Image (spheres, rainbow, N blue to C red):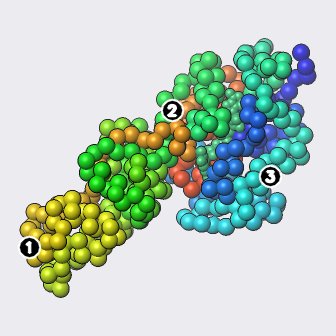
């Protein structure tokens, strides 16, 4: 058997490569193993090819986990500003897009290059494609059996990410290893994913595919697995259902069988209602048609669809009774609809669930049951909101682990 490593990291994605670079530069002898023929594919396709690599405002409130406190220590020790410093040290040009989201000006490939450069500084060995056949405990350490032979290590870091986008090599390997060693895994489900619909109400709206507008969306309920949340973002109507940042965010809090609520005016709390009532009650609007009244607050195509849905198309506003006005107001301010499902792993950006945080030390990401076994990145039951928080978790969890191996 060959030399013994200080750490073997399985998975050379965002978390794995970052952890390797930091640990290598701390003097550890590190080997990264990945089954892919090209590394960093998720980084390459992220942020529309520009990688939303962090979020200036990233805080524990931006994460879903059965234990919301779990992320606190790692995020405090490696906050967004530390990764920004690193980006600046590589002179990677970046810009803020929306609500603190930072993107590369040029290309996500710059982040991959940065990670490889950091690994080179730490003399990290990176081998790919390699198949990991099995992992076993070996005295105080671990043995990793690969298609090119066994490798022994003191610490083993599982960093194989989540299940989204199987076409680029996503697997549940970290979850399988967690289960093999008796760690509890929270059932994984797709998150930050478009929602599909079958309800008749929605079918009419599919005619509006391509329409995008700012809304306020609410998903989840008090006492739900991951709680509930309201987002003010853009919604996109598509042929398959609802998408856009608002819906991706809401999907993480949605559980099958539950409704989501949409305020199509997307204004600040309380403001939507008074805006709607002011338009409905204005004397000068009495002789306008219903769709014209609605178009004073909604895009024309949506206004027409809503008027048609309530069989009020072409009807003068003065002739619309109290009951119908109330029904329209409910439709505009509190459209409650039950998604049929999500578009699944192919279209999801991240995974909800993963290795139960109760099994891990939040300071180090090490298993409480097995010394030297670590889990970092997306395979842990920590899921960020859209907007750079998932990469921030990859960097922060990797950094915490690197200090401990
Ligand atoms: P990651 O997926 O990066 O790496 C896992 C590695 O493990 C891969 O190299 C894989 O090949 C390897 N692996 C898997 N199974 C293996 C096995 N059995 N043996 C060996 N190796 C194995 N986030 C964000 O913050 N900003 C953004 O802009 C985006 N954009 C975005 C777009 C799209 C389309 C997707 C799908 C996702 C995003 N994300 C994102 C999410 C982000 O990409 C994700 O959270 C991180 O890449 C997670 O980092 P990890 O290192 O945990 O997994």
- Residue closer to the observer: 311 or 341: 311
Would residue 333 appear left or right of 78 to someone viewing this image? left
Which badge, 1 or 2, comes first in the chain's sequence?
2
The residue to which callout 3 is attached is 114
Residue at x 40%, y 58% (from the top left corner):
209
Find the distance from the CA under tag 2 to the CA under tag 3: 30 Å
Find the distance from the CA under tag 3 to the CA under tag 1: 65 Å
- Label for residue 387? none
The residue to which callout 1 is attached is 319
- Residue closer to the observer: 243 or 220: 243
Which badge, 3 or 1, comes first in the chain's sequence?
3
The residue to which callout 2 is attached is 188
Residue at x 65%, y 38% (from the top left corner):
168
- Residue closer to the observer: 55 or 26: 55
Kindly indicate whether the residue at mark 2 contacts the one at mark 1 (C-beta within 8 angstroms). Answer: no
Residue 303 vertical position relative to residue 378 in the rendered view, above or below: below
- Helix, strand or loop status at disc 2: strand
Would residue 148 appear left or right of 306 to someone viewing this image? right
Residue 308 vertical position relative to residue 165 in the rendered view, above or below: below
Find the distance from the CA under tag 1 to the CA under tag 2: 52 Å
Q: Quadrant of ligand 1?
A: top right
Mark 1 surroundings: few (<14), some (14-19) or many (≥20) residues within 10 A = few
Quadrant of the frame with the N terminus = top right
């Amino acid at each position: 058997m060959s030399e013994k490593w200080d750490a073997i990291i399985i998975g050379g994605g965002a978390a794995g490569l970052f952890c390797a670079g930091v640990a290598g530069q701390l003097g550890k002898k590190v080997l990264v193993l990945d089954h892919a023929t090209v590394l960093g594919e998720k980084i390459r396709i992220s942020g529309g090819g520009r990688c939303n690599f962090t979020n200036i405002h990233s805080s524990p409130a931006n994460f879903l986990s059965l234990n919301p406190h779990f992320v606190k220590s790692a995020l405090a020790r490696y906050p967004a500003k530390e990764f920004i410093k690193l980006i600046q040290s590589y002179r990677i040009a970046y810009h803020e897009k929306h609500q603190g989201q930072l993107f590369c000006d040029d290309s996500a490939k710059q982040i991959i290059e940065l990670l490889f450069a950091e690994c080179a500084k730490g003399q990290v060995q990176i081998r790919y494609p390699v198949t990991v056949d099995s992992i076993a405990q070996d005295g105080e350490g671990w043995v990793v059996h690969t298609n090119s032979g066994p490798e022994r290590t003191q610490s083993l870091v599982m960093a194989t990410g989540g299940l989204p986008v199987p076409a680029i090599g996503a697997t549940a390997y970290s979850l399988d290893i967690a289960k093999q060693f008796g760690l509890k895994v929270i059932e994984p489900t797709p998150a930050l994913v478009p929602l599909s619909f079958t309800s008749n109400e929605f079918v009419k709206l599919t005619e509006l595919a391509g329409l995008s507008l700012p809304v306020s969306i609410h998903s989840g309920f008090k006492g739900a697995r991951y709680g509930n949340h309201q987002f003010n973002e853009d919604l996109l109507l598509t042929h398959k259902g609802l998408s856009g940042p608002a819906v991706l965010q809401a999907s993480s809090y949605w559980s099958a069988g539950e409704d989501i609520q949409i305020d199509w005016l997307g204004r600040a709390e309380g403001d939507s209602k008074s805006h709607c009532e002011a338009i409905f009650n204005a004397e000068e609007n009495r002789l306008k048609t219903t769709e014209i009244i609605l178009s004073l607050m909604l895009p024309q195509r949506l206004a027409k669809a809503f008027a048609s849905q309530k069989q009020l198309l072409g009807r003068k506003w003065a002739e619309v009774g109290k009951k119908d006005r109330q029904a329209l107001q409910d439709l505009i301010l509190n459209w409650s609809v039950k998604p049929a499902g999500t578009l699944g792993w192919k279209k999801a950006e991240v995974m909800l669930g993963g290795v139960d945080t109760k099994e891990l030390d939040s300071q180090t990401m090490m298993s409480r049951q097995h010394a030297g076994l670590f889990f970092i990145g997306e395979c842990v039951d920590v899921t960020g909101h859209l907007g750079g928080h998932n990469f921030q978790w990859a960097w922060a969890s990797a950094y915490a682990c690197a200090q401990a191996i």
